[in-house]
Image: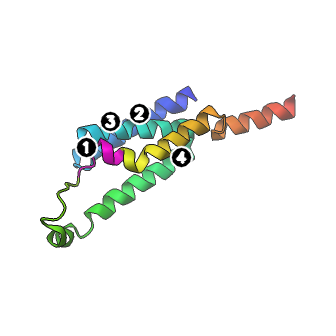
């Protein structure tokens, strides 16, 4: 699990830096994304894949037809394209909590496979 957590930390860090570079995340949002991404990877790569897919599609969709959307909501909504820590946690906090709970309960994919092998041998 430690290896997967480290790999997840590095992957989440790279994605957060990339998202920061294209202004999809604020500094605080990047830190929050690093935490959420690491938690997801600790639970297993399927969790991380779901999170990455959600982030990439939501970031892409938020930029889709941006000019038309900004014209419609000008003066009503004061929001930049950068997601801050509060937005990251609002969208990913529960997911991260469930990923951590899954890991702590021994329900991470590699843990299940390992326990099944141990039961057969035992």
Q: From the image, tell me which residue sits under label 3.
A: 31
For label 1, the crowd category at 10 Å Cα-Cα, with few meaning under 14, some 14 to 19 and many 20 or more, is some
Q: Nearer the viewer, mark 2 or mark 3?
A: 3
Distance (Cα) linking label 2 and label 4:
16 Å
Which is more toward the observer, 93 or 22?
Answer: 93
Distance (Cα) linking label 4 and label 3:
19 Å
Q: Nearer the viewer, mark 3 or mark 1?
A: 3
Q: Which residues are magenta?
A: 82-88
Residue 62: mark in rendering: none
Q: Is residue 111 above or below residue 77?
A: above
Q: From the image, tell me which residue sits under label 2.
A: 10
Residue 47: mark in rendering: 4
Q: Which quadrant of the structure image shows residue 108?
A: top right
Residue extending farthest to the left is 75
Q: Quadrant of the C terminus?
A: top right
Q: Quadrant of the N terminus?
A: top right
- Mark 1 falls on what kind of element? helix
- Residue 14 locus on image (x, y percent): 35, 38
> What residue is shown at x 12% (from left), y 65% (from top)?
75
- Mark 4 falls on what kind of element? helix
Residue 20: mark in rendering: 1
């Amino acid at each position: 699990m430690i290896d997967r957590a480290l790999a997840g930390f590095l992957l989440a860090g790279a994605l957060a830096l990339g998202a920061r570079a294209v202004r999809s995340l604020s500094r605080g949002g990047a830190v929050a994304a690093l935490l959420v991404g690491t938690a997801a990877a600790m639970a297993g790569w399927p969790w991380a894949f779901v999170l990455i897919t959600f982030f990439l599609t939501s970031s892409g969709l938020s930029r889709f037809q941006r000019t038309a959307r900004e014209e419609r909501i000008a003066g009503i909504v004061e929001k930049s394209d950068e997601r801050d820590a509060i937005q990251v946690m609002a969208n990913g906090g529960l997911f991260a909590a469930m990923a951590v709970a899954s890991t702590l309960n021994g329900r991470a994919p590699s843990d299940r496979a390992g326990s099944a092998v141990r039961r057969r041998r035992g």
